[in-house]
Amino acid sequence: MPNRKFSEYMTDWLYGDDGYYATYKNIGRSGDFYTAVSTSKFFGGSVAKHIISLVDEGFLETNATICEIGAHHGYFLADVIEFIYTLRPALLSTLNFVIIERFDDLQEQQTNYFKESFGDVISLTHYKSLSELKCKNAFFIANEIFDAFPCELYFKGKTARVDGHKVEFDVDNKWVDEKAKKYYKDRGEIAIGYEEFAREMADSCDKFEFMTFDYGEMQARPDFSIRVYAKHEVIPFFDENIKREELFGKSDITYDVTFAHVKDAYEEAGVEFVELKAQMVALVDMGILDLLEILKENVDEKIYTQELEKAKMLILPNFLGERFKMAKFRKS
C-alpha cells in the first residue's frame, strides 16, 4: 500500500472498490452500529411532520423535491413518505422524491425497497451527486453524513501520512494548518470536502432547507475522536492493540463533527445557518410527542408501548438524544 495522505487512506477504507460503504451493510442490532433511522420510524415521522409544516407556511411548494443524501437502505426517506401518507396523503402525488447515492449497488437496494414498500405509488429518482440535481425548491435531509467525509489528521503543526497502515505526523500542509488554527485545534481531525459539498447543494437548488443529524459539537474537540466501529465495539484509532489491516474496509471509521466547520462552509456558499440543537430538542420541537399521541389513540397498548420504547432511544440523553445534534440551513 503506497505512502499517502490520511484522507486518501480513509476514502479507500470507506469508499474504495472494496470499501465499507461500497456494498450494502446491515445497520442496527445485526450490524456494526445503530443509527436513529434503525432505532425508530418516528425519526422519519418527525421530519415528515416538519416538511408538512414547511408546506403550510409556504416555504416549500407542493411540488418541492424531498431529497435524502446518503440513504443507505432507504429506510429514512421511506419512513418520511409513510408518515406524509398518514398525515397529508395528497402531498404524495405532488412532491418529488430523490436520493443522492454514488454506488450502483446501493441504488439498486433502495429501488427494490421502495418498490416493495410502495409499488408504483411513489416514483424515486436517483442521482450520483448533488451536482447532477437541478431544482427550484427542495428539502434536503441527511443522517450521519458529515462524520463520513474523509479527513486529515493533525498534530502540533504536522499533518499525517499513512505508510501501509502506519500513521506518521511529518507533513507540512498549509490548508490543514490554517483550518486547525481557525478551529483552535492543536490535534484532531480536519474534514475534507465540506466546502465543495455546500457549494454543490447551493448550486443545485434556488430555495431550500437542509437538515442534518450527526454527532459532534459546534466547537472542535481538544483531542482525536477518530474511531472504528465493528460489531458495536468502539475501537479508538490510536489504540495500541488495533489491527488496522484487518479492519480496513470491513468496519466503519468515523469521527466527531466540528459543526463550526460545516457552518462556515455553508455560509461561504451563500447559505444561511439557522440553528444547531440537540437531537432530542429538535425532535420534540418537530412534533414527535404529538405523533406518539396519535399512535396511542389508534393502536392497542402493546404496540404503543413497543414503539414508545424505541422512540425514547431517539430522545433520551444517555442514548442518541444529547450526543447527536441537528443542524439546519436555508437558502431563500
Image (spheres, rainbow, N blue to C red):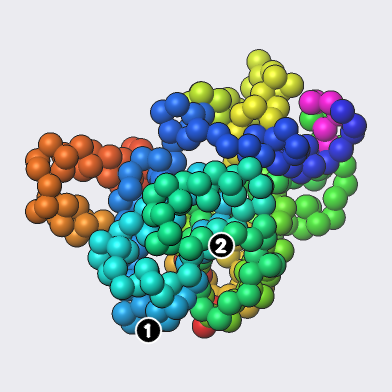
Q: Is residue 88 above or below residue 111?
A: below
Q: Residue at x 90, y 32 (%)?
A: 2
Whole-percent x, y for residue 202 in the image: 63, 74
Is 289 positioned to the left or the right of 169 in the image?
left
Q: Residue at x 48, y 63 (%)?
A: 123
Q: Is residue 87 above or below residue 169?
A: below
Whole-percent x, y for residue 212 in the image: 49, 58
Whole-percent x, y for residue 272 in the image: 54, 75
Q: Quadrant of the N terminus?
A: top right
Among the 4 quarters of the image, the one containing residue 262: bottom right
Name the residue that disc number 2 marks: 125
What secondary structure characterizes most of the magenta part? Answer: strand
* Badge 2 or badge 1: first in the primary sequence: 1
Q: Residue furthest top?
A: 241
> Residue 325, can we see it?
no
Q: Secondary structure at mark 2?
A: strand
Q: Residue at x 70, y 46 (%)?
A: 150
What's the residue type where badge 2 is placed? Thr
Between disc 2 and disc 1, the foreground one is 2
Look at the image and give the residue range highlighted in magenta.
Answer: 160-166
Name the residue that disc number 1 marks: 58
> Does residue 126 belong to the magenta stretch?
no
Residue 266 versus residue 208: which sits nearer the camera?
208
Pointer 2: residues within 10 angstroms few (<14), some, or many (20+)? few
Residue 94 versus residue 255: which sits nearer the camera?
94
> Residue 25, can we see it?
yes
Q: Is residue 90 above or below residue 128?
A: below
